[in-house]
Amino acid sequence: MIDYAQLHALSAVINEGGFERAARKLFITQSAVSRRIQQLESQLGEPVLLRQQPPKPTATGTRLLNHLQQVLQLEYGLGINALQFDSDPQKPLIVRLAANSDSIATWLPEALVTANNEINARLQFEIVLQDQTVVLNRMKSGEVMVCIASTAEPVNGGLVSYLGALRYRAVASPAFVAAHDIQSVADLADAPCLVFDEHDKLQHEFLTDIVKATPKRIHLCPSSEGFRQSVVAGLGYGLLPELQIGDGIARGEMVDLAPHYTLDTPLYWHYWQTESPLLASLRAHALNVAKRRLIQPGVS
Amino acid sequence: MIDYAQLHALSAVINEGGFERAARKLFITQSAVSRRIQQLESQLGEPVLLRQQPPKPTATGTRLLNHLQQVLQLEYGLGINALQFDSDPQKPLIVRLAANSDSIATWLPEALVTANNEINARLQFEIVLQDQTVVLNRMKSGEVMVCIASTAEPVNGGLVSYLGALRYRAVASPAFVAAHDIQSVADLADAPCLVFDEHDKLQHEFLTDIVKATPKRIHLCPSSEGFRQSVVAGLGYGLLPELQIGDGIARGEMVDLAPHYTLDTPLYWHYWQTESPLLASLRAHALNVAKRRLIQPGVS
């Protein structure tokens, strides 16, 4: 059987980004961490991680981490939280959850607080941010227990629930529209455009759809609220979730540049087949919140 | 004299995180990128970067990148934008700016749009996020032109302007206060606490100051708006900038847990001694915005 102390050492080195920090996290010495990983590698006859800064798991290391997440959930269902090296069933389950930034800035926090205080008391979240198009890599690599992604396809050993879609609209401040003399959407092609990060293609998609052009001048702003504030300040135009626009249009903070145009990003709750009852309750609650806050099929 | 095409290749490899992406950015082949860096290294007799994923500059590489940022600004003052390999003075200056997440979510976007449209048209921002306590490393490593940090000490070759302070208050939702039976601040020690990331010590500082305790249960939420939403949803309590609280207390979304307690984080605008006139105008504008939006000495 696998020595799980070795897998915990591997997991800590990857999640903490180094041997020294892993040792601190596990309350053991750095040489104990190294020894566990070397033993694991000599049993397997191959390396489980690449010794670089930060360390990265090999393909085999990734499979082991993935397996560990699933075992942890199974064990948790038994009332034993192995992640803590502790059999106290009252210890909370640490849920590493990866999501896109716009979800965390809008509907997701509400989805993490269930109506049942006993369930809430047993969950402890470590949220990891990543663009919705690439976030699923965190699940594939076995780093997280739950992942909010725009991909419908489950990962190996995983399952998927559909949440609904985030609806985006193209907006800018009234001062921006005046300063850049935006008479029609065609004028946007030359105006400065806000982009979240290198993975964010929403603005490119919008401009291609609507005027067959790509943005010429781009400001990169990798913060959901910063993006909204930058729209309001007039730094550029961009696509914002309706949930983040709120009453911003009604209050005159921004204008809808293309009122008949919306872009919907579907979102899925990815989880492991070995989902514990606790996480199943959380998922049921999250689906309820999503049903209320996200765009559902057949509703417009 | 230094061959700046070589330094641009180095800069692109570091900023883009790899040789292939650097080549795409510079519109040259990947082997041309490698060749420029090898030539640079053979002239220096030492490596300028570590070949790992992503590549990291050596100490010498860092000094060169740092130097390149300063030269670029000097050149830009002449009306030549070397970063673009282009002498068109109308090309915008790409300003890589590192800041803490709470600044981008609140006062900073307004500070990046001056009253002068000609200046705005010549600036293109690439914002990089990092906690205020470690963000200055981005400046030290020569990755950015401007940095918003809580450190007053300038980096080598740099200067500093004081902006003011972000004022934080400890808040939670009314439902959270009820669910965790918070009768006084002492009860917070056992209640779940929101923490931005591993560098965020505000909650620890608050709890130590007020009840000589450290948070026992922590949810990590590395998003400014997500942090606010998590407070409102009742996931935990935490310290929020007053600028983000807005009218949230008046509207009953949250309560001030310790009305007489505030934590002020000073913020400084770090820039290079070789600051171009364009960036000097931006800084003057940013200082004006900060004077209005941040807490100033002697004002409470």
Image (cartoon, coloured by chain):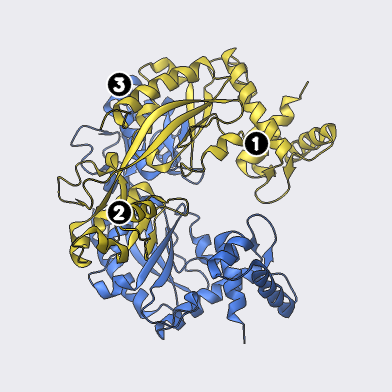
Chain colours: A blue, B yellow
Query: Vertical placement of A128 versus A250: above or below?
Result: below
As measured in the structure, the alpha-carbon distance from the residue carrying label 2 to the one carrying label 1 is 47 Å
Q: Secondary structure at mark 1?
A: helix
Taking the image as shown, residue B77 lies to the left or right of residue A270, namely right
- Tell me the amino acid under the disc marked 1: Ala
Q: Secondary structure at mark 3?
A: helix
Q: Tell me whether circle 2 and circle 1 mark residues in contact (CB < 8 Å).
A: no
Image location of residue A283, percent across then percent down: 33, 70
Query: Vertical placement of B154 versus A203: above or below?
Result: above
Image location of residue A71, percent across then percent down: 50, 80
Write the residue at 39% across / 24% down: B286
**Tag on residue B12?**
1
- Label 3 sits on residue: A178
Write the residue at 40% across / 52% down: B196
Chain that bears disc 3: A
Chain that bears disc 2: B
Write the residue at 53% across / 27% down: B94
